[in-house]
Structures are given as C-alpha cells and as structure tokens.
Image (cartoon, grey):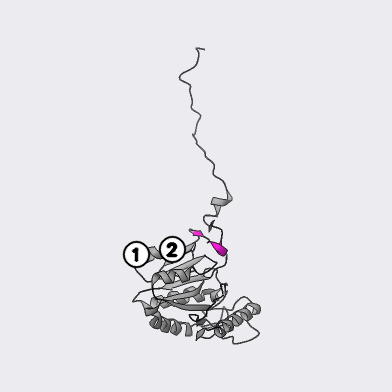
C-alpha cells in the first residue's frame, strides 16, 4: 500500500492555512505514512507566496526524541538504513536538476534523525516514481488545473491526493479525474478515516478498499427473514381432511 501522493495547491487567499496543510501532509510522523504527500504541485501564480510560508513553517519544526523538551513535531525515520537511503535520494534529485528549498540535514551519522527537506524538481527531466518514505517533499509548478491533474496522475501509485484551494467546480474536476482511492479537499493527504474506504489503485491497491469496508470482501452476503413465533396456514389447493 505504497504511495507517491500528490498535493495540489490552487487559488486561495489563506496562505498560512495552506502551508500548515502542506507541512501536515508531508512531515507528520516524519513523512512515514503511506498517505503522506510526496509531491507538491502548485499553481504558478501561488508558488512564491506559498513556498515562502511553507519554508518559514518547516524551518520551525522541532526534530527530536518522544520525551524531549520542547516536544518535537518529528521523530526519527525508522532506522539508519532508511536515513541513508533518503539522504542519497535527496542528493540524486539535487544532482539531476533539483533546486534545494530546504536542505536535508542529518545531525548525527549514527542516528536516523533527519530534518524536513523540500526540493524543487521542476527541472528534473525524469523524476523517479518511487515512494520516498520520509520527510522529503518534491515541488513542481503547473499553469492550469488540467496540467496539475496530469502531473498528479504521473505515477504508478494511486493512494491519496488532495486539493487545497480552488472552487467547488474545480474540486469536482479534480475529484473526477485524479487517480487515487482517497481524495480530499482542503484537508491533508493523511489522516484517513477508518470509517471510510481505504485503499487505492495501481501499486497502491487492487480496487478493493480496506478499513471499514474490508468485511465486504472477506465475507459473502446471506439473506435471512425472521418471525418470533411460527405462524402458517395453507388456504387453498388442499383436499378436505
């Protein structure tokens, strides 16, 4: 149930709120959720103000152990091997045309703590379609919503997607055309409800969502009719007894 999940930001005057949703989507649990946003796609006219606020907020994120004071927003990634892989992935994107907005920093080589990282991959010709399971957000721009949707769908995965901003009509277009099993509007990509279907398409699932709906494919329907006491008679078609 992997994901290379897109988060699209469109027209909205609420830049601070949009930035908070971006940070929640990308960096909650140090990005170690299958529904975490891996790719941020921004309307070109929104890019500068939004990225300034996202970076300002990401720069304030505290990384630390669970009981540190002050309380951290992010803990470590799962192990040193994962931290090594994420560091290598950041360097790969950087060396293939990526522009660092916020560098990936590992304070200690012997521990898997990483800072939240943001990289603009607009100039990367062949973006790796892999799930980078950690606090590494890739950013690109789109001039119109169709282009944004096409970029959102440019993945073998199809788990989660969100649109921030836009009109109800634009969200209807987004919802109808984005290839994902969990689609949100003005909400993070993560934090899915267990009372709703959970799953996706492509490498993110098999069109048979889990969570509350798992019982639908783990069982078969049974019809039943009931009465508290037996009551029956045959009124026609019998010989006299």
Q: Does residue 160 lie above or below 114 as drawn?
A: above
Where residue 177 is drawn, which disc sits there? 2
Find the residue positioned furthest to the bottom. 107
Residue 173 percent location from the top left of the image: 39, 64
Residue 224 percent location from the top left of the image: 52, 38
Which residue is more in the foreground, 129 or 22?
129
Q: Is 199 colored magenta in this rendering? A: yes
Residue depicted at x 42% and y 78%: 19
Residue 144 percent location from the top left of the image: 38, 73
Residue depicted at x 52% and y 65%: 159
Q: Quadrant of residue 68?
A: bottom right
Report the span colored magenta: 197-207
The Cα–Cα distance between marks 1 and 2, rounded to whole angstroms, is 12 Å
Q: Does residue 95 appear to the left or right of 48 in the view shown?
A: right
Residue depicted at x 53% and y 70%: 4
Residue depicted at x 42% and y 63%: 175
Where residue 169 is drawn, which disc sits there? 1
Find the residue positioned furthest to the top. 240
Q: Does residue 108 lie above or below 160 as drawn?
A: below
Q: Secondary structure at mark 2?
A: helix
Find the residue positioned furthest to the front. 125
Whether residue 104 is visible: no
Q: Earlier in the sequence, mark 1 or mark 2?
A: 1
**Discs 1/2, front:** 2
Q: Secondary structure at mark 1?
A: helix
Residue 184 percent location from the top left of the image: 43, 66
Which residue is more in the foreground, 55 or 46?
46
């Amino acid at each position: 149930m992997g994901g290379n999940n897109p988060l699209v930001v469109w027209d909205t005057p609420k830049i601070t709120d949009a930035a908070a949703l971006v940070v929640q989507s990308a960096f909650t649990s140090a990005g170690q959720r299958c529904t975490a946003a891996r790719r941020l796609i921004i309307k070109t006219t929104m890019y500068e103000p939004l990225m300034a606020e996202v970076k300002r907020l990401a720069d304030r994120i505290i990384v630390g152990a669970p009981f540190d004071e002050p309380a951290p927003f992010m803990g470590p990634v799962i192990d040193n091997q994962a931290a090594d892989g994420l560091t290598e992935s950041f360097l790969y994107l950087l060396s293939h045309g990526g522009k660092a907005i916020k560098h990936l920093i590992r304070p200690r080589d012997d521990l898997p703590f990483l800072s939240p990282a943001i990289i603009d991959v607009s100039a990367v010709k062949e973006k790796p379609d892999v799930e980078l399971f950690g606090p590494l957000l890739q950013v690109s721009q789109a001039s119109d919503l169709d282009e944004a949707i096409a970029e959102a769908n440019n993945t073998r995965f199809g788990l989660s997607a969100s649109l921030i901003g836009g009109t109800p009509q634009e969200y209807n277009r987004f919802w109808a055309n984005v290839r994902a099993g969990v689609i949100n509007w003005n909400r993070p990509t993560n934090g899915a409800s267990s009372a709703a279907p959970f799953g996706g398409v492509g490498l993110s699932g098999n069109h048979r969502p889990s969570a509350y709906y798992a019982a639908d494919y783990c069982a078969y329907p049974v019809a039943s009719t009931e009465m508290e006491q037996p009551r029956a008679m045959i009124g026609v078609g019998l010989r006299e007894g």
